[in-house]
Every structure is written in C-alpha cells, then in structure tokens.
Image (cartoon, grey):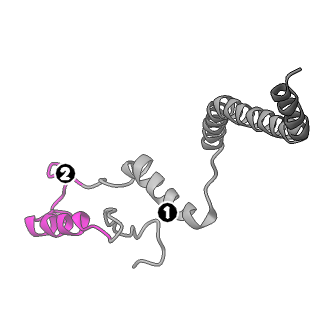
C-alpha cells in the first residue's frame, strides 16, 4: 500500500465510530419523519371522519338544558298549537246585538295582538276562561 492509502485508512478507522453514530442518528431521524408524515396522511382524514360521525351522532341525541326548556316549549307551543286557541272570535254574521263588535274594538284588539315582546314573539292576551288569575 502506498503511504497515502495508509494515512487515509488510519483516518477512516479513527473516525469510524463517529460516522457509524452519525449514520444511526440520520437513519432514526429519517424513520421518525416518515412515521410522522404517514401518521399525518392517515390520521388527519381519519380524525375528521370520526369527528363528523360523533358530531352527527350527538346532534341526533341532543338534549336541552332545563334553563332553555321554558323558552323552547313556549316557542314550540306557539308554532304548533296556538292556532287551536287563538282567533276564536265572532264574525259579523254570528254577532248578536249584545255582542256586536265595533270598529273601535277590532282596532284596539288588532293593536294589542300585533305588539311584539322583546324576544320577538307576539303578545298573547290572557284568556279569562283558562287563566283564573285574570278577571
């Protein structure tokens, strides 16, 4: 062997442990990055799908808190059942002399029924038949 080859061999032998350690570190870093990318490619779409499924499932079985139940029930009642009880007034043909409806009465009734609360719901007059507190 020539002297240059011998010197190069000694230098490589001297630094061999460092190079092996460096190669192992590079290999571990490469494996970590590949695993991270693979996890992101699989995990992100899978996580989104699971999130959407759970959200849809939660919406199907949604409950309402007791704090909001009164508001919800009032709105539900107005939307579905108030028509059965509101609007039962006499027409001009059915009215008798004692029950005659004047234009002033109808205008006053229209004003009170068209008023809106702060919530945006129409004001409903209390019915003396169903509500004993009203006289």
Q: In the rendered image, which quarter contains the C terminus?
A: bottom left
Circle number at residue 71: 1
Q: CA distance from mark 2 to mark 1?
A: 33 Å
Residue 96: percent from left, percent from top:
18, 58
Could you tell me how many numbered marks the image carries?
2
Is residue 7 left or right of 33 when viewed as pictured?
A: right
Mark 2 vs mark 1: in front:
1
Q: In the rendered image, which quarter contains the N terminus?
A: top right
The span shown in magenta is: 90-117
Q: Residue at x 74, y 33 (%)?
A: 30
Comparing 88 with 119, the one in front is 119
Can residue 103 be found in the magenta stretch?
Answer: yes
Quadrant assignment, res 60: top right
Q: Residue at x 36, y 67 (%)?
A: 119
Can residue 126 be found in the magenta stretch?
Answer: no
Residue 56: percent from left, percent from top:
60, 37
Q: Residues within 10 Å of mark 1 (few under 14, many from 20)?
A: few
Is residue 62 left or right of 101 when viewed as pictured?
A: right
Circle number at residue 91: 2
């Amino acid at each position: 062997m020539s002297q240059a080859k011998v010197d190069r061999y000694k230098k490589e032998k001297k630094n061999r442990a460092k190079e092996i350690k460096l190669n192992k570190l590079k290999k571990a870093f490469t494996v970590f990055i590949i695993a991270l990318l693979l996890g992101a490619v699989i995990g992100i779409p899978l996580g989104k799908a699971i999130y959407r499924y759970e959200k849809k499932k939660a919406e199907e079985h949604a409950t309402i808190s007791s704090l909001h139940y009164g508001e919800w029930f009032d709105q539900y009642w107005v939307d579905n059942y108030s028509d059965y009880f509101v609007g039962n007034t006499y027409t001009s043909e059915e009215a008798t002399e004692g029950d005659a409806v004047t234009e002033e009465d109808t205008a006053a009734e229209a004003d009170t029924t068209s008023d809106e609360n702060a919530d945006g719901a129409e004001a409903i007059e209390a019915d003396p038949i169903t509500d004993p507190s009203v006289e």
